[in-house]
Image (cartoon, rainbow, N blue to C red):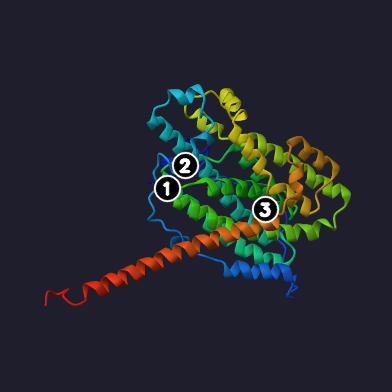
């Protein structure tokens, strides 16, 4: 079935064209480059994986409950709308929310792929070009995996959220080479990691857990790359140049906090937009998510050197200022360990199955098995 047949609402156009700006930069300096970045590049090469093989696509997914997360996380839970819904309606709501979430992941990963390719083109340093090339492949794999999950297991897609598209467009239209890092690696990827992690840690279904854990393992490298490159570069900028980037971060953070709430889902269930917004604003789960949303962004922004007075005030206003002292390295090491533990568990199960097969074959071939 065509992707366009699965959209809840058809996109305005079959494709989106963003005019390119800025310069493509070549470097004739083929020295080794920065040791930290080259080590990350080596890790990026070593950690490539095939989504067809590493993920167990034979696992079944119930479209009426694709994630197995608590219903309390749904905006309508506990409202009069929820009380009127049949179990079939509630299953359809779960399906729509999963479709909306994973569709935004899919569109975001395509955006990350384009941004990573743009970084290869525009970043001045060869070591950064090398790493960005591995990230471009990572993002292509992520888009492939999310697309497959939505097509084969959920059977429904949502168009890209207008505000996510707007932030992505602003990131790509800027001619400064560092803006794809800042807009994508720090803001959009930071948002995605918070959403990935919340679902990864609450889902009771093995397939989405595998997908999210393995994607997050890759993203840990991407965040590290953005931190290294931007930290080095922002030390060289003037106060005025830093303020421009801080304004971009402030605007992007408010946009993501206030506009990415799944109102589109509620509208598809016949709820007027303003009521849908009001219901979302009063959702305890959404308030918790907004707090977690910044757990990856605020410490990264502080780490790369964007920590002016206006930005700090904005984070105080959002109630997330204290997250600036969170350890990104600890979060990323946990992401890596969760993925590796899933691999160990799966390999152990496969090994037990092989041992059982061998033991059964030996038993069947033993004395008396043939009737002698």
Nearer the observer, 98 or 342: 342
Name the residue carrying label 1: 151
Mark 1 or mark 3, which is nearer the start of the sequence? 1
Quarter of the figure with the C terminus: bottom left
Residue in the image at 51% along x and 33% along y: 265
Location of residue 367 by image quarter? bottom left
Does 195 sit left or right of 322 as displayed? left
Q: Is residue 112 visible?
A: yes
Q: Residue at x 54, y 63 (%)?
A: 340
Which numbered disc flags the more N-terminal residue, 2 or 1? Answer: 1
Q: What is the number of callouts on the image?
A: 3
Asked if the residue at tag 3 contacts the one at tag 2, i.e. Cβ–Cβ closer than 8 Å, the answer is no
Above or below for 31 versus 182: below
Q: Secondary structure at mark 3?
A: helix
Given contact means CB atoms under 8 Å apart, are the residues at marks 2 and 1 in contact? yes
Q: CA distance from mark 2 to mark 1?
A: 8 Å
Instruction: Identify the mark at residue 185; answer none if there is no mark.
Output: 3
Tag 2 residue: 157
Of 151 and 4, which appears nearest the observer? 151
Residue 118 makes an appearance in the image: no
């Amino acid at each position: 079935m065509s992707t366009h047949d699965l959209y809840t609402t058809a996109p305005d156009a079959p494709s989106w064209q963003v005019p390119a700006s800025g310069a493509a930069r070549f470097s004739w300096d083929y020295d080794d480059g920065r040791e930290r970045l080259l080590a990350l590049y080596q890790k990026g090469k070593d950690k490539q994986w095939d989504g067809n093989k590493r993920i167990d696509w034979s696992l079944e997914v119930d479209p009426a409950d694709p994630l197995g997360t608590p219903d309390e996380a749904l905006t309508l839970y506990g409202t009069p709308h929820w009380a009127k819904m049949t179990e079939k309606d509630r299953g359809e709501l779960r399906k729509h929310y999963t479709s909306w979430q994973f569709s935004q992941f899919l569109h975001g990963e395509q955006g990350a792929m384009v941004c990573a390719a743009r970084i290869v083109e525009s970043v001045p340093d060869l070591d950064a070009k090398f790493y960005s090339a591995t990230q471009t492949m990572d993002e292509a794999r992520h888009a492939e995996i999310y697309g497959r999950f939505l097509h084969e297991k959920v059977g429904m897609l949502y168009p890209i959220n207008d505000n996510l598209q707007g932030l992505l467009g602003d990131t790509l239209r800027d001619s400064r080479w560092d803006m794809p890092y800042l807009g994508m690696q720090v803001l959009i990827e930071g948002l995605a990691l918070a959403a990935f992690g919340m679902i990864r840690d609450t889902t009771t279904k093995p397939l989405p857990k595998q997908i999210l854990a393995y994607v997050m393992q890759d993203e840990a490298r991407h965040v590290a790359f953005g931190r290294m490159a931007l930290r080095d570069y922002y030390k060289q900028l003037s106060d005025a140049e830093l303020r421009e980037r801080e304004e971009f971060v402030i605007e992007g953070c408010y946009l993501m906090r206030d506009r990415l709430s799944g109102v589109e889902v509620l509208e598809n269930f016949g709820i007027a937009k303003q009521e849908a917004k009001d219901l979302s604003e009063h959702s305890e789960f959404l308030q918790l998510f907004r707090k977690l949303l910044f757990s990856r962004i605020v410490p990264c922004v502080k780490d790369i050197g964007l920590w002016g007075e206006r930005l700090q005030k904005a984070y105080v206003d959002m109630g997330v200022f204290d997250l600036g002292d969170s350890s990104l390295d600890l979060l990323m090491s946990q992401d890596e360990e969760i993925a590796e533990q899933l691999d160990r568990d799966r390999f152990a199960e496969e090994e037990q199955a092989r041992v059982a097969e061998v033991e059964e074959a030996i038993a069947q071939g033993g004395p008396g098995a043939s009737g002698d």
